[in-house]
């Protein structure tokens, strides 16, 4: 069987199959010879199909421990300080036909597929003996329980609440440990799509697409909830809607959480990705923190957090990272801080949202292009009188608006995020850049 690749891009160059899973396992086993490796999987059909072949490859050279069906934050939690390598077979928020491999070291820092795995990767033959071993593998022989300590940590750390919440588990990995934790913390919780199913029958497990948020918005409104939350497929993203069913962007949530953390730990360094609203660094400075801008992506953010000893990081894409737990994503800690902000400020979530929604943000807009580099250079030339940074793509800062334009690593796309002082300017500038991209895209035909 073959499955579309996620998070292992650039190593194999084609769809993932049993041969790839075995080969990757064998290569990692050799790299971590006689070391201890923790393995888990999300609910995906592809993850479960490839898992036995991956473990057979691993165990030829290393010691394998199987955690079962878990979320990605649980994999990080279980690996940190206990295993030499942690691996989860997952495709995060993608449709059911995808699968992939996320890896981290003993500090829960992500391992780069391109920089650290590609140089050691080699394809191995999948003979009948290996196939038979994989097909008859008893996963219980490798089983370890990492959920017990995870539950204990959050039940001790997070406050019980009579706040009425609705939770959409999107039929993903959080239907197991995270569901148990939330059941104990919230007596008035409404759970939907709360059974594991790798076909994702309710909707794609994505916290950003509006078509995926319809269920949680409906549940909040019908049950008069104070807020709603939605996890993605592997549980490392948290989407939030207020009591009216309106969506709070990841950067607004970052600002809310940052303020609460800085009340506890003033002068802390807080990392935010360069797509975030200006309100984020403004709030961080206002409450005595040190804002640090980062390029997009968990690999870069986690490394940066370790390097500068940052207390917290947030992304527009609903990833929230905490030093407290190990510099990795924790939606449950994020929720705890959001509820704390509502309680301490005695505000509904919609009221908090208004406080922080000071500027007009476009959200991420994708443009299909023929030549990413050419168009970005032309855009730079067009805005040469503005301040330009090149941390990740190009970030252009003008008088009453700014934008970031960055290339996708996997598709012929340019991704635009633009923010302006008001909605009229925002719409006007988005249209201007859209027209410029179309113009330069046509030019390429004649070069």
Image (cartoon, grey):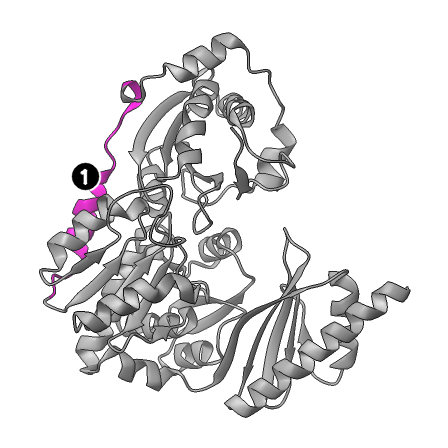
Q: Quadrant of residue 120?
A: top right
User: Does the magenta segment cover residue 159?
Assistant: yes
Image coordinates for residue 220, horizontal then vertical, percent: 23, 69
Name the foreground residue: 104 vs 431: 431
The residue under label 1 is 148
Q: Is residue 309 visible?
A: yes
Q: Residue at left 46%, top 44%?
A: 91
Residue 224, x across and y down, in percent: 17, 74
Taking the spot 16% from the left edge, 46% from the top edge, the residue there is 152
Closer to the camera, 56 or 96?
96
Q: Position of residue 115 (x, y in %)?
A: 62, 40
Q: Most extreme residue toward the right, as rendered? A: 447
Q: Is residue 305 above or below residue 228?
A: above
Frontmost residue, 169 versus 398: 169
Question: Is residue 3 inside the magenta stretch?
Answer: no
Q: Position of residue 170 (x, y in %)?
A: 32, 53
Res. 265 visible in picture: no
What are the residue bounds of the magenta stretch?
A: 141-161
Q: Quadrant of the C terminus?
A: bottom right
């Amino acid at each position: 069987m073959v499955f579309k690749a996620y998070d292992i891009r650039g190593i194999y160059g084609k769809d993932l199959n049993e041969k790839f899973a075995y080969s990757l396992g064998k290569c990692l086993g050799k790299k971590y010879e006689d070391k201890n490796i923790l393995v888990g999987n999300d609910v995906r059909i592809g993850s479960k199909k490839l898992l036995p072949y991956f473990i057979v490859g691993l165990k030829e050279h290393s010691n394998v421990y199987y955690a079962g069906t878990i979320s990605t934050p649980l994999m990080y939690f279980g690996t940190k300080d206990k295993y030499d390598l942690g691996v989860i077979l997952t495709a995060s928020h993608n449709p059911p036909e995808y699968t992939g491999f996320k890896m981290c070291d003993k500090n829960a820092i992500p391992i780069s597929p391109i920089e650290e795995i590609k140089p050691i990767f080699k394809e191995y033959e999948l003979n009948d003996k290996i196939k038979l071993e994989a097909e008859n593998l008893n996963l219980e022989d490798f089983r370890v329980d990492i959920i017990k300590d995870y539950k204990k940590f959050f039940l001790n750390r997070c406050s019980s609440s009579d706040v009425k919440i609705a939770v959409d588990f999107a039929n993903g990995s959080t239907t197991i440990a995270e569901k148990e934790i939330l059941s104990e913390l919230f007596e008035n919780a409404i759970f939907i799509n709360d059974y594991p199913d790798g076909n994702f029958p309710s909707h794609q497990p994505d916290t950003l697409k509006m078509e995926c948020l319809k269920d949680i918005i409906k549940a909040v409104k019908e049950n008069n909830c104070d807020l709603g939350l939605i996890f993605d497929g592997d549980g490392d993203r948290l989407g939030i809607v207020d009591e009216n069913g309106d969506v709070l962007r990841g950067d607004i949530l970052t600002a809310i959480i940052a303020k609460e953390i800085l009340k506890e730990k003033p002068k802390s360094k807080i990392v935010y990705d360069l797509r975030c609203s200006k309100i984020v660094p403004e709030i961080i400075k206002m409450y005595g923190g040190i804002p640090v801008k980062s390029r997009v992506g968990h690999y870069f953010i986690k490394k940066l957090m370790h390097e500068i000893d940052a207390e917290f990081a947030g992304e527009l894409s609903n990833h929230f990272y905490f030093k407290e737990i190990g510099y990795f994503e924790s939606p449950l800690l994020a929720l705890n801080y959001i509820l704390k902000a509502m309680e301490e400020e005695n505000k509904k979530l919609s009221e908090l949202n208004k406080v922080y929604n000071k500027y007009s943000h476009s959200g991420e807009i994708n443009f299909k292009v023929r030549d990413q580099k050419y168009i970005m250079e032309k855009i730079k030339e067009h805005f040469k009188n503005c301040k330009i940074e090149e941390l990740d793509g190009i970030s252009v800062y003008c008088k009453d608006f700014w934008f970031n334009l960055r290339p996708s690593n996997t598709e012929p796309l340019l991704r635009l995020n633009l923010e302006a002082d008001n909605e009229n300017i925002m719409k006007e500038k988005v249209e201007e850049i859209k027209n410029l991209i179309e113009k330069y895209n046509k030019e390429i035909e004649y070069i």
